[in-house]
């Protein structure tokens, strides 16, 4: 063997040293980092870990109840459990979708699609506010523990169903008030949520409440309405009968205490169930008492006459030649339904003569007519505690013409809401005070000064009482409102029939609004009722005295009996023995 082959390869001495040096430096860096983590930054990382382990959780506040004037529940809140899934931990989404769909009555395909689209997420609501039965069924599925859970929430319940639905509104899935009292008093009803600190495990589940509440939740306050559920039921049932008998597009009713301005009933058809809002039709959401506008027709006439009397334009013993049913007023030819000759001021209202009212308009002239409509509140919102109220339509005086002089006294060329109209009539019934209507009862500590600020004297009590006790009472005893007679009570009222206004301008041929307002007793009115029926489709003539008067009178009769308003015994005897 040669010398070259037996000689070993010489490794440079610097290479091992370099390797040792690099390893040493690496160990020194690692040791330094460990020192940093264990001693220098220990507190910082401990705090961070604790923050990830701990969470400040909001404690929802229980929304306050809504009750009627007697304390009966109209809206309340129950505890409920809501189901969520953790899609990122679900290994078999199709199986879970199949299981949940069967017990929760939801679409399997839709749920599976959501799970797949949100596969990376750690939280996904599946169904909010489950029933007790649904909670039990979900538990029996024995789904993997890390993939699902319940959270406690509140569920809004409306024990009376459709009763007063448009007044109440509803709370949506996130607890936000939508429509009615729920919306207008959302801040008071919602309450103030609290906070607490909780500990979570590595999977994000709450395992411990660490301490007492950081801030306690304060429940929402109770809101007490002026409504009376019993009177409300009377109104709702009569509207159901109107819908069945006359088949109109819509109708509404309102009952008010004219002395206090408190609304005892407010109902609309079509309606909805706030417990099942998904089933509501598009035309059922509107509160027509505050948001339908229409020409009031003859129900407006008493306001013009009372203003004319009070301001000296008219006298109670005035008479008017009604021209045997035809009267040319400028370019217009006016007609009455009957060929009236000479009528007293009282009979102009009792017979609802348009010609007589046009002649009153000529005597008063446009400035006084405009002021009469204004002081009775037309063209302005009443200020009731409900969202969505419309102001009606009252054009500026400068836009009025000689045509207006005849139209306005007949209740044309202006538009009102049912609430505006009954508020104006309440001013006549209570002796001349225009009172802002209210549907929420005042705080017991509310001062008399505040209440006085809600009223305004617009005509004298003598004038208002005469209008009620004579023309409006005689409308019921011998005029267009005879179907509103109530045995045992002196009833006053006024009929109204007006053509529907077209959105394009003018009127819709053959379409009418039928209305009737009535109250009792004449001597000291306790209640006032208005029924408005929109576009009856059967039954021929749709005069207010035929379509709306019976329903208004039935509501009034039942409410008077329920509230124990004593009847006139002499009238009762006469009603039972008419020959005597």
Image (tube, rainbow, N blue to C red):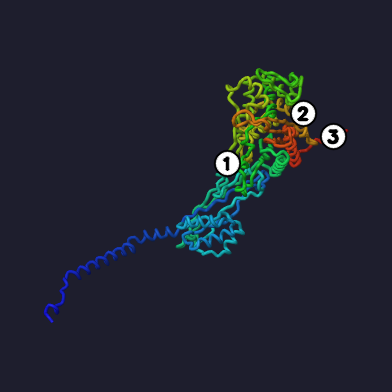
Local packing at callout 3 (Cα closer than 10 Å; few below 14, some 14-19, many 20+) is few
The reply to whether the C-beta atoms of the residues labelled 2 and 3 are less than 8 Å apart is: no
**Which residue matches tag 3?**
574
Q: Which mark is residue 17?
A: none
Secondary element at image label 1: helix
Disc on the earlier residue, 3 or 1:
1
- Name above or below for residue 437 compared with residue 218: above
The quarter of the rendered structure image containing the N terminus is bottom left
Secondary element at image label 2: loop
Q: CA distance from mark 3 to mark 1?
A: 49 Å
Q: Is residue 213 left or right of residue 575?
A: left
Disc on the earlier residue, 2 or 3:
2
Residue 562 found in image quarter: top right
Q: Which mark is residue 184?
A: 1
**At which x and y percent is residue 451?**
62, 35
Q: CA distance from mark 2 to mark 3?
A: 20 Å
Q: CA distance from mark 1 to mark 2?
A: 42 Å
Q: Is residue 513 left or right of residue 92?
A: right
Q: Nearer the viewer, mark 2 or mark 3?
A: 2
**Which residue matches tag 2?**
479
């Amino acid at each position: 063997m040669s010398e070259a082959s037996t000689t070993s390869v010489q490794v440079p001495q610097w290479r091992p040293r370099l390797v040792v040096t690099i390893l040493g430096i690496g160990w020194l860096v690692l040791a330094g980092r460990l020192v940093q983590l264990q001693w220098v930054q220990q507190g910082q990382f401990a705090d961070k870990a604790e923050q990830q382990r701990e969470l400040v959780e909001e404690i929802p506040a229980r929304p306050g109840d809504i009750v009627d004037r007697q304390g009966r529940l109209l809206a309340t809140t129950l505890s409920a459990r809501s189901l969520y899934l953790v899609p990122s931990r679900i290994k078999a989404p199709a199986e879970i979708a199949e299981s949940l769909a069967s017990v929760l009555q939801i679409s399997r395909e839709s749920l599976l699609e959501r799970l797949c689209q949100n596969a990376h997420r750690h939280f996904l609501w599946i169904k909010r506010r489950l029933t007790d039965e649904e909670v039990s069924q979900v538990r029996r599925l024995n789904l993997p523990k890390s993939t699902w859970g319940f959270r406690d929430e509140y569920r809004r319940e409306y024990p009376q169903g459709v009763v007063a639905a448009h007044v109440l509104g509803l709370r949506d899935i996130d607890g936000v008030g939508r429509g009615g009292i729920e919306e207008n008093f959302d801040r008071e009803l919602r309450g103030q949520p609290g906070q607490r600190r909780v500990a979570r495990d590595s999977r994000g589940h709450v395992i411990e409440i660490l301490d007492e509440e950081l801030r306690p939740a304060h429940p929402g306050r109770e809101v007490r309405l002026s409504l009376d559920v019993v009177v409300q039921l009377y109104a709702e049932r009569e509207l159901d009968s109107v819908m069945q008998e006359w088949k109109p597009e819509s109708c509404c009713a309102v009952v008010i205490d004219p002395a206090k301005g408190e609304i005892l009933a407010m109902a609309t058809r079509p309606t909805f169930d706030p417990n099942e809002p998904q089933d509501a039709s598009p035309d059922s959401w509107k509160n027509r008492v505050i948001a339908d506008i229409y020409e009031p027709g003859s129900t407006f006439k008493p306001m013009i006459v009372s203003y004319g009397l009070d301001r000296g334009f008219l006298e109670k013993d005035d008479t008017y030649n009604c021209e045997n049913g035809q009267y040319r007023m400028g370019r217009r030819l006016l007609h009455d339904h009957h060929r009236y000759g000479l009528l007293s001021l009282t009979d102009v209202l009792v017979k609802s003569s348009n010609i007589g009212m046009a002649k009153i308009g000529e005597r008063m002239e446009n400035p006084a007519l405009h002021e009469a409509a204004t002081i009775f509140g037309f063209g302005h919102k009443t200020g009731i505690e409900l969202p969505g109220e419309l102001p009606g339509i009252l054009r500026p005086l400068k836009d009025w013409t000689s045509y207006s002089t005849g139209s306005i006294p007949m209740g044309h060329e202006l538009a009102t809401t049912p609430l505006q109209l009954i508020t104006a009539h309440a001013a006549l019934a209570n002796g001349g005070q225009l009172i802002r209507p209210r549907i929420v009862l005042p705080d017991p500590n509310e001062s008399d000064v505040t209440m006085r600020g809600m009223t305004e004297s617009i005509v004298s009590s003598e004038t208002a009482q005469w209008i009620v006790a004579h023309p409006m009472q005689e409308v019921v005893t011998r005029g267009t409102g005879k179907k509103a007679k109530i045995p045992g009570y002196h009833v006053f009222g006024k009929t109204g029939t007006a053509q529907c206004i077209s959105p394009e301008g003018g009127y819709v041929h053959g379409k009418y609004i039928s209305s009737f307002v009535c109250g009792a007793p004449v001597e000291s009115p306790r209640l006032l009722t208005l029924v408005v029926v929109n576009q009856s489709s059967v039954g021929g003539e749709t005069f207010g005295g035929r379509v709306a008067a019976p329903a208004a009178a039935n509501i009034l009769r039942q409410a008077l009996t329920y509230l124990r308003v004593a009847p006139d015994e002499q009238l009762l005897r006469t009603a039972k023995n008419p020959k005597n």
